[in-house]
Amino acid sequence: MTSYCGPPAALGIEGAGRGWVPGSSARIGHGFRSPAPSSAAINKHGTSAQPVRAATSGTLRKHGTSAQPEPCCDTTSGPSPPPHPPPVKMADEATRRVVAELPLLRTNAGPRDRELWVQRLKEEYQALIKYVENNKNADNDWFRLESNKEGTRWFGKCWYIHDLLKYEFALEFDIPVTYPSTAPEIAIPELDGKTAKMYRGGKICLTDHFKPLWARNVPKFGLAHLMALGLGPWLAVEIPDLIAKGLIKHKEK
């Protein structure tokens, strides 16, 4: 097992071995907001009808009543969770700025493509290096990543600062054989069963807002985009909620 604290010199990336993934903590998730529901319906004559309660976790039937919500994730492993806020909106201004500064990848190759996969890994490292440098410049470092020698198994730490306390979690994911057409599924095992926005095994639920975005940007999106657009917003929504409910506690308390 090889630890990637910097891109390997064998891949020909400038700056190899300089400690490209920082370990300092900072706040994450600035500017992530849920979309605001509308407060009134407009009838066919163009006049305002009686206000209709917005469906935050379901859909509206044609007569204006709220349908039953369908959970996006598996909740059969434990007690039914309380009502959950709507998914975080991905296309806010802060997210656009972050993504605009990330390099787009060019090589459409996965682990089965051998030589092309080596080229894809070069691009992945370059994008991750750029993202980490941007985070350092913004005083917003929030994760570390390592991989095995083949670049198919990734693991590390992510953290979230809440009320000046650092909450750190181990993360892991595998590169799918159909990557980059299929996005990796990030798992935070210690949070398994604590939130409805998670599948069994601790895999975070990004289906509603992330996977369609990823599918429209194959092969341009890579692991840096997975962290910036997937895990980052998920932490910003879920961790404060879990702390407020007492489901996770700071280790020093």
Image (cartoon, rainbow, N blue to C red):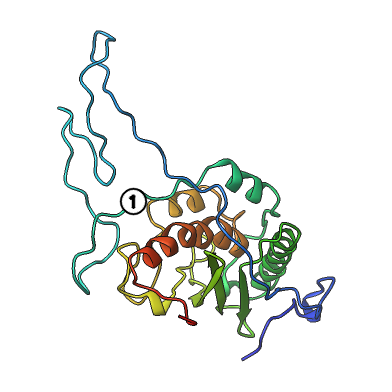
Q: Seen in the image, is 170 located left or right of residue 135?
A: left
Compared to residue 46, the image places residue 96 above or below, namely below
Out of 98 and 164, give the one closest to the viewer: 164
Q: Residue at x 53, y 60 (%)?
A: 232
**Residue 38 visible in the snapshot:** yes
Out of 208 and 175, give the one closest to the viewer: 208
Across and down, in percent, residue 24 comes to 68, 73
Quarter of the rendering occupied by the C terminus: bottom left
Compared to residue 234, the image places residue 36 above or below, namely above
Q: Residue at x 65, y 50 (%)?
A: 98
Assign a secondary structure to mark 1: loop
Question: Count of labels shown?
Answer: 1
* Pointer 1 local density, CA inside 10 Å: few below 14, some 14–19, many at least 20: few
| Kind of residue at disc 1 | Pro
Across and down, in percent, residue 176 comes to 48, 71
Q: Residue furthest bottom?
A: 1
Q: Seen in the image, is 18 located left or right of residue 216?
A: right
**Residue 112 visible in the snapshot:** no
Q: Seen in the image, is 159 located left or right of residue 253?
A: right
Across and down, in percent, residue 113 comes to 60, 72
Q: Residue furthest top?
A: 45
Across and down, in percent, residue 239 comes to 44, 64
Quarter of the rendering occupied by the N terminus: bottom right
Q: Which residue is mark 1?
A: 85
Q: Residue furthest front?
A: 253
Q: Residue at x 16, y 46 (%)?
A: 68
Q: Residue at x 26, y 66 (%)?
A: 74
Out of 135 and 26, give the one closest to the viewer: 26
Q: Seen in the image, is 120 located left or right of residue 33?
A: right
